[in-house]
Each structure stands twice: as C-alpha cells, then as structure tokens.
Amino acid sequence: MSTYKNIFGKSVKFLATDPDNAEAEGQIWYNSTDGAFKDVIVNEAWSSSSPLNNANQNNSGDGTQNAALSVGGTFPANMADFEEYNGSGWTSQSNVPYDAQIAATCGTQTAAITFGGTNPTNPREATTIEYDGSTWTAGGSLNTARLGMFGAGTQTATLAAQGGSAPSAATNITEEYNGSAWTTVNSTVTTKRNSPAGFGVQTAAVGAIGGGDPSENPTNTSEEYDGTNWTASATINTSRLNLSGTGTNTAGLIHGGATGVGGGTNTGATEKWDGTSWTTTSSMATARNQKGQRAGSSSAALAFGGYDGTSPSSVTEEFTKSINVITPAAWSSGGTIPDSKRDGFVGSIGTQTAGLAFGGEPVNAETYEYNGSTWAVGGDLGTGRRVAAGFGTQTAAGAAGGNTSVGFSAFAGYETYDGTSWTEQNDLNTARASAAGAGTQTAAVIFGGGTPTFSSAVEEYSGSSWTSVTSLPAVRSFHAGAGTQTAALATGGQASGSPPYGIYNSSVEYNGSAWTAGGNLITARTLLGGAGTQTAFIAIGGDTNYNPHSTQTLCEQYNGTSFFTMPSLAVAGQNFRGTGGTTSAAYEAGGFGPGGANVDTTEEFTGETLALNVKTITTS
C-alpha cells in the first residue's frame, strides 16, 4: 500500500507552530499546539492598491501587474491622461498626443499601442499611436474608425475586433496590425457588439467576450481566434458589457462590467478561462463598469478606474493567485494624543512603535512618546515652541529653531532629547521657524524656513556647533524633510507667506555638500508631513491652497527618482504634531484636520504583507 511519504516524498511533520515558507505548499503537517492537521492551499482574491492620480472611466490600459499603463479616459477632463503603475502606485506622465476615451490599448509599459476611441471632434476615431516607454508616435490608422472594441497582442502584432462604428452602433469587423499598417481580416462570427473583452495574441486569442448587442443588451458569448478564423466558444457565467479581460488563449481572466441594459447595473464578478470553460472566482471589492482596462495575467491581474455607478473611480485592485493571503497596504487608526494641537515639529522622528510629538500651537513645551498603541507624557521642552525642525529617534531627538510666540518670533535655540528630558545645546546661526530637518541628534542638517522672511539658508550640526553650508536652490518653508546629514530630502512647501504663496511640487536632494533637483510631487502642497529617507520617503497629507485651506488625504511615495500614489489617509490632515517611520511602517499624529479644527488622532501606515494561506484539514 502506498503511504503519504511514497506519494509526496515527505513524511507528515509534527510541528508546534505552522511553517512560514513556500515549502509548506501541498504538504500536510500536524500542529501539536492546535491539535489539528493542516495544509497550505492556493488562494485567489482581489486586494486594494494605490489609486490612480485622476478618477477615471473609459480609460484603456495594458501591461503587467507590476508595470502597467492607463491611457485616456473620461470626457472632458482626462481624455489625454496617461499614468504608469510600478506595482505599488501610479505616476502621472506626459499627456497622450490625442484625446480619446473608449479606445483600446495593447502591449507593455515600454512598447504599447493605443487605437480607436471617441472624442468631441471625431465620434469614431481611426487614430493609432505607439509608445516606447518615453515617447508617443503616430502609427497606421485603422481601416474602420470605431470605439469600444477589444484589442489583443503586442505593439507590432495587434488584433482589434468588434466595437462601435458609423453608421451602425456596433460591428463585427476584425483587423490585424503589423507594426505599421492595419489589414481587415475575417470577422467575428457572433452578433455585432460593443464593449466586449478579449485577450491573447494576434494568432491565438479569446475575444468577443460578453459585450452589448446593437440594442446594448449584455451578452454571454465568447469566441476563439486562430490567426485566420473565429469560432464560437464557451459562454461566460454572467452576461455583461463594458468588461475587461487579460491573459492567454489557455489561461485568461475577465472582470467587472455592467449587467443591465445599456450598462445600468455594475458588477465586480470575475471569471477564469482554462482554455475550455469559464469558472467563477472571487469578485472585485468595487463593482464597476470598465471599458478596455486590462493588465497582467490570469494569476496576477490589475483593475483600475472605471465607473462605480455614481462617478468615475480611481480605485485600483490587484488579483493574485497564490499560496499567500495578501493584506493590502493601508492607513489605520492609532492611539489618541492627550492634547489636540497642530504645528509640532517639521521632519521625521522615530518609528511607528517609537514615535515622538512635541511643541505646537498656541506655543507649548509638551512632549509625548508613542509606543505603537498609546501616547505617554515625556519631558517638557526647555523653551516652548512650534514648527521646529525635528530629526532623530524617540530616545535621541533634536529640535532646532521654531516659533516661540503666537505671532511670529523666530528662535535659534537647539535642544536634544534623551527619552526622558531635553537639554539645551548651542544655538543655530540664524533664528528660524518652519524649517525642515534631517539626520541625527549629533549629525543634523536643517534647511529653509522663515526668519520671518522665507529663507534658503542651510546649517549642519557637528555634535557641538552649527555651521552654515550650501543654501537651497530657492527659498522654501512649510516643507517636509527626511534623511541624513549627507543624504537629505526637502519636498513641497511654499515660496512666500503672502498670496499667491508659490506652493511647490518640486523636491531637492542634498549629498552633504550640494543640492540637486529630485522628483516632483504629483500634487503640489505645503504644510505636509514626511517619513522615511531620501530614497524611500512618504509625503503625508498637506494643504494644496494654504489660504483658504484645502486639507488633503493625499499620500505619495518616493523611490529616489519619482513620486507615485499610495493609499490615502482616512482623515485629511496637515500641520502635524509629529510624523515618522518608514515607507512600510509610518505614523502621523495630531495637526490640523478638516474644517480647520485641531485633532488629537493618530494614523498608522502598514505596507502590504503576505502570509501563507494555512487551512485546517477537517473530515467534513
């Protein structure tokens, strides 16, 4: 008789704790602590990711789950919109050269093709454009101008089929592209339709999946293409139009769409294709009407934008088939600061489980320490202040400069904190408030601020005294800062305290001797918080207008080259009491909330985590 070891090559292990690595897949073990047999099984699910910069519907896209693009979209605002996804968030790129919505896009992030669509000038577009990873150029025009078709293949071997064209509302025409020109080939065999899904390559595709017939009734048919002919294939489980699809002719995925006549009822339904039949799997969290957005594979797909039934959406979701359960990155509520204030320090101090908040309006000396769940009272500052430059750790922090009055009274004092009490050190050379800081308690750098005139001055601390060094390229105040004395980042802020304020989206980087341009924020803002380092930084909240205030939930992550979207704060905030941590575990506390009220809340950011999908084996 065969044994488990004979079949699988391993014995059933006797373990006190569950394993935490991929070797557990397909194996059975006995957990002596739980008194149960267990196994790891494959999990299929959607998880949330960072949103598009612009809420968008009728956009098209392709690529992989970690390198996707979104092209065009909502009339009239986003028809030339173009964004790229890096697996974590979206970055806005230069606009596409022609306005279009309900177009089709195929290929990769560095070799893409977009064709067709509609705009106010041309209700049915024949235009084709090609992307090489940096520049869009004109390609050959479609023979039949149309919108709402599906595309499959690559930039130089593309398939376009069905869609809406003049004079009829839908067509079953198919065309192939060879990298320079389109050729009309055999049409699909099913009824003409608009906004179906399709995927695969030019010589082996699955298409005409769902879509709306000439009366915009959702359909459930699909077809297969062998490079010459279309043949009817298996029907999908949920009839719909305006859906998306990705994959190959033997392993595909469709998701979203609308089940009502004319696209009236959205769905998040997701189905898998195995080359023979369709099987329902986990639905998207956000039901939405998606026309042409597609990226990834049947085991690692991406859904972005669409119409959620009320308005264009910025929601992005990732579909993963894995032995892991994914917990998406998100901000969540943390402990409450005992006293609600704003205008604490400017900089990044400590970690999510060892944070610090001090000072603030109207002008106080309070210090609070955070342990990841609660705030406790620490030692008071020697001199009460607000908007000092802050840096270091919870037990070795520095507070340089600040404002010592309700009005404006720039301060030159420098104090250090040892986790219990603050000690006065040598003063700055130039008194200032609203400067940002970086580095450690004994090797710090502060930059910009107000004296009260906005300044570009920079000073470094050697452990005993401050020295003036290379100035910022321009005056900057109310900005965010992070990093070290030899690798610092300054981002956002403003150039003036009077209208029009000159709110920055720019960043500059310091190498210990000179400042150079860094990546631009997607959204210019001032009074923002920050956490991380020069090459791994989070820009938190802030204000896009200053007066009147426009407090934001926006958060962006920086990788040393460019900023990209990440999950937003649950509650809009600016002028924080304290911020710090890393790009995978950050915190923000206190500050100025919606409506202008000071808040005592804390939010914690936790990056995406993976855990094995361990299941207990039962006899039922």
Image (cartoon, grey):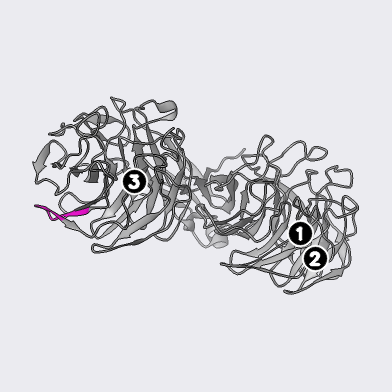
Look at 59% across and 44% down and name the residue there.
314
Placement of 66 over or under 576, stated as above or below:
below
- Secondary structure under tag 1 reads loop
Q: Please report the bounds of the magenta region as a residue range.
A: 458-467
Q: Is the C-beta separation of discs 3 and 2 under 8 Å?
A: no
Q: Which sits earlier in the primary sequence, circle 3 or circle 1?
A: 1
Q: CA distance from mark 1 to mark 2?
A: 7 Å
Placement of 578 over or under 512, stated as above or below:
above
Residue pointed to by mark 2: 142
Residue pointed to by mark 1: 116
Crowdedness of circle 1 by 10 Å Cα count: few (<14), some, many (20+)? many
- Secondary structure under tag 2 reads loop
Can residue 249 be seen from the camera position used here? no
Look at 34% across and 32% down and name the residue there.
591
**Percent x, y of residue 249:** 74, 63
Closer to the observer: label 3 or label 2? Answer: 3
Residue closer to the observer: 353 or 426 = 426
Q: Which kind of residue does numbered mark 1 sit on?
A: Gly
**Percent x, y of residue 295:** 64, 57
Q: Is the C-beta separation of discs 1 and 2 under 8 Å?
A: yes
